[in-house]
Amino acid sequence: MLQPSPDFRVSARPRSLARWLYIVAALIVAMVAVGGITRLTESGLSITQWKPISGIIPPLNDAQWQAEFANYQRIPEYQQINQGMTLAGFKSIFFWEYVHRLLGRVIGLAFALPLLWFAVRRQIPRGFGWRLTVLLMLGGMQGAIGWWMVASGLSERTDVSHIRLATHLSAALLILGGIVWTALDLRNLAANPLARPARLHWLGGFALAMLALQIVLGAFTAGLDAGYAFSSWPLMGNAFFPADAPMLAPAWRNVVDNPVVVQFVHRWFAFAAAGAFVWLAMAARRRGAVNAWGAVILLVGLQIVLGIATLLSGVEIVVAVAHQVNAAILLIAAVAAAHALGHRHGAPNSTASTHLVS
């Protein structure tokens, strides 16, 4: 722990850190969009090796492209589904997976390098150094989770594990939520030197937990291609729930592995989650967070409309990606509302030590 000195009080830059974190959050939302496109275009298994450093350079000549294509031709997805694919077809799916991985590297650098800059210049307020370090470590772990997900589809399966996909998406949104919460704490500190980090109010925790569960169900829906099971709403075909749907044993597996049940639960649990968001939004409004209230209400309604449109369109890629991206933006709004509930002004006996660098 660095020893504080009076000079550190003026060196902390909470507003600058908050702006930087907002930029990183925007990049993560873009990453969610590209990840959705990668999944919907079945591009995720086109790169069969994990090269964190050298992988930044794509194939540059015909021999390198042929080598990458040969690697892809060895996996089950090609042999059982895409046999006969041309090199041009391979390049089109390679593009999205490459962009997805490249953007992940960009986000890593966009977080790590400014963090190092702020740390060297001792501009990180006390109490935030450890939090930013944890977020950095989670980002590094996310890269490993991404490869763990891809590896599940390289030997026996023709696609990635939907459970690993859900883990990958959930981790990305956990990092996004942590970054936004930290940015809001820093923004409050910039406005009021005595402000303390917000606490997670039980209602905020409940609403965010409901959102997390709905996101997991959405990832299961995407990973199992469950969105294609029924393209009607509110009925699934001609019934509320199809009576002839095959069921798995034990019964709990149906919520995880049965595409029909997963789609059913995802489409109706959305309204329970929406109720929690509305409750959170109203509480935030009473605390004066009018912008967060309006954003949550608007985005919840839009998310339901996009979810229904995704089904009715037969999972048309633009609509489905908009549904996924809106979920990430809704998370940001929900975090802002939850943060407003837990916002704490500085106590009368607080000191300017909140500005000291750790």
Image (cartoon, rainbow, N blue to C red):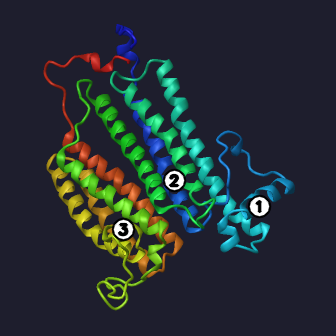
In the rendered image, the residue lying farthest to the bottom is: 238
Residue 190 appearing in the image: yes
| Residue 140 x/y as whole percent | 52, 38
Quadrant placement of the N terminus: top left
Judged by depth in the image, the label closer to the viewer, 3 or 1, is 3
Residue 20 appearing in the image: no
- Alpha-carbon distance for marks 3 and 2? 33 Å
The residue type indicated by label 1 comes to Phe
| Residue 298 x/y as whole percent | 30, 63
Q: Quadrant of residue 238?
A: bottom left
- The mark found on residue 35 in the picture is none
The residue type indicated by label 3 comes to Arg
For the point 38% across and 31% down, the residue is 131
Residue holding disc 3: 253
The residue type indicated by label 2 comes to Ala
Residue holding disc 1: 69
For the point 66% across and 73% down, the residue is 80
Residue holding disc 2: 30
* Local SS, label 2: helix
Q: Looking at the image, which is closer to me, 41 or 326?
A: 41
* Local SS, label 3: helix
Q: Earlier in the sequence, mark 3 or mark 1?
A: 1
In the rendered image, the residue lying farthest to the front is: 249
Q: Quadrant of residue 275?
A: bottom left
Mark 1, other Cα within 10 Å: few <14 / some 14–19 / many ≥20: many
Mark 3, other Cα within 10 Å: few <14 / some 14–19 / many ≥20: few
